[in-house]
Amino acid sequence: MYDIIMYAIQFGIAVGSRFNEKLRRMWRGEREAVRTLQEKVDPDARYIWFHAASLGEFEQGRPLMEQIRRDCPQYRILLTFFSPSGYEVRKHYAGADIITYLPIDTVGNARKFLRAVRPVMAFFIKYEFWYNYLHILQHRGIPTYSVSSIFRPDQVFFRWYGRSYGRVLKCFTRFFVQNEVSKQLLDKIGIHDAMVVGDTRFDRVLQIREASRQLPLVEKFVGTDTADRKKVFVAGSSWQPDEEIFLGYFNGHKDWKLIVAPHVIGEDHLKFILALIKDKKVVRYTQATEENVADADVLVIDCFGLLSSIYHYGDVAYVGGGFGVGIHNVLEAAVWGMPVLFGPNNKHFAEAQGLLHDGGGLEVCDLATFTLEMDRLADDGEYRMACGNMAGAYVKGLAGATKKILSNVKL
């Protein structure tokens, strides 16, 4: 049944590629993957394979790749992606020697792929459980690790109808899981080689903080005079429902500056944001100058790649997505030691739940709850500072997964 599903997915991508650019890139990349390996693989080199579904999983694997790169230069790194949103953004990543798509998990594709590269070790990030690839790796005796994986009782592996597919988990040499619940669930189905190490994303956001850029235009917008400086609210990865709430609040408040970095940077959406803002001077980042940005009230970030550094300038952060499919990366904001607000769809996001539990994160459900939380943060400086300190402490307290993993892997 699994193989039938894989062939159906492969067929669907092939057909869809005629009409969809994303699927077209995916189909082309998967077909070219083996040829890329055949051309680029050094037969005398030893490759460690990292597989990430998309960009988020790549960020979880990145600390491991870069630490191996530093400590064990005798290895080469192969990095694969399933999604175009990961591959297209990171296809020139300097931390890997070869970067390709991963072909759909059919028996034939898996055999050709692994025959072309012959890795000495493999790391699959978080939710990657490809049946054929994993069984061939196990058959060949190649150590294979699941990194930053997290399990819940409602997943197919722990249901009666998923027992057959659940055998794929026995192909891993060891699991490095995020929490104790995941370890207990694996133990119940006879998988005992699991270690609770936490999430490598905490290590990654600390790296991002260390490498953050100074942004002169943002500094000019924020101001450097601490006596007269207004507080700064940074909204990152926001969507329309998020923007309607926080802009609805700040339209009635003059004592804060706003930086809005929307998730979708398209002209229609930018116009929507600008139309929501009332009685404030607004500057788009790509049109900002030292002269027009200094006295602006709102700075709209209309380009990519700046958000993780922009959080540095905030006093309170809002992370979008919580009124849709799920919140975006709250850790990139929390690492700067400030309160982090987000919408209600956060129950399956362990880091958001952790921030809520520790007091560094605040959930908002509508304009009324946003007003309640924001008024207190605005009026009570000690409370705002305490929430920020708890957010920063939460991130630092859970760092260290990379070191734990690599100390339990034979390199």
Image (cartoon, rainbow, N blue to C red):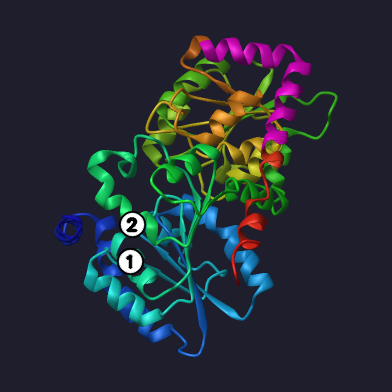
Relative height, residue 411 to residue 191 (above, below): below
- Is residue 377 shown in magenta? yes
Q: Is residue 221 left or right of residue 200?
A: right
- Is residue 242 shown in magenta? no
Secondary structure at numbered mark 1: helix
Q: Quadrant of the C terminus?
A: bottom right
Q: The residue under label 1 is which amino acid type?
A: His
Looking at the image, the residue that sits furthest to the bottom is 44
Q: The residue under label 2 is which amino acid type?
A: Val
Q: Give the residue number, with chain letter if any, for mark 2.
A: 168
Determine the main secondary structure of the stretch shown in magenta. helix
**At 28% from the left edge and 75% from the top edge, which residue is drawn?**
111
Front-lying residue, 110 or 159: 159
Picture coordinates of residue 361, whole percent (x, y): 61, 26
Q: Is residue 27 left or right of residue 288?
A: left
Q: Give the residue number, with chain letter if any, for mark 1.
A: 135
Q: Magenta span covers which residues? A: 369-394
Picture coordinates of residue 385, whole percent (x, y): 76, 23
**At 47% from the left edge and 87% from the top edge, which residue is drawn?**
42
Q: Earlier in the sequence, mark 1 or mark 2?
A: 1
Tell me if residue 23 can be seen.
yes
Front-lying residue, 184 or 88: 184
**At 41% from the left edge and 80% from the top edge, which residue is drawn?**
118
Circle 1/circle 2 CB separation < 8 Å: yes
Dividing the picture into quadrants, the one containing residue 160 is top left
Secondary structure at numbered mark 2: helix
Count residues near mark 1 (Cα–Cα under 10 Å), then give few for <14, some for 14-19, many for 20+.
some
CA–CA distance in space, label 1 to label 2: 7 Å
Dividing the picture into quadrants, the one containing residue 309 is top right
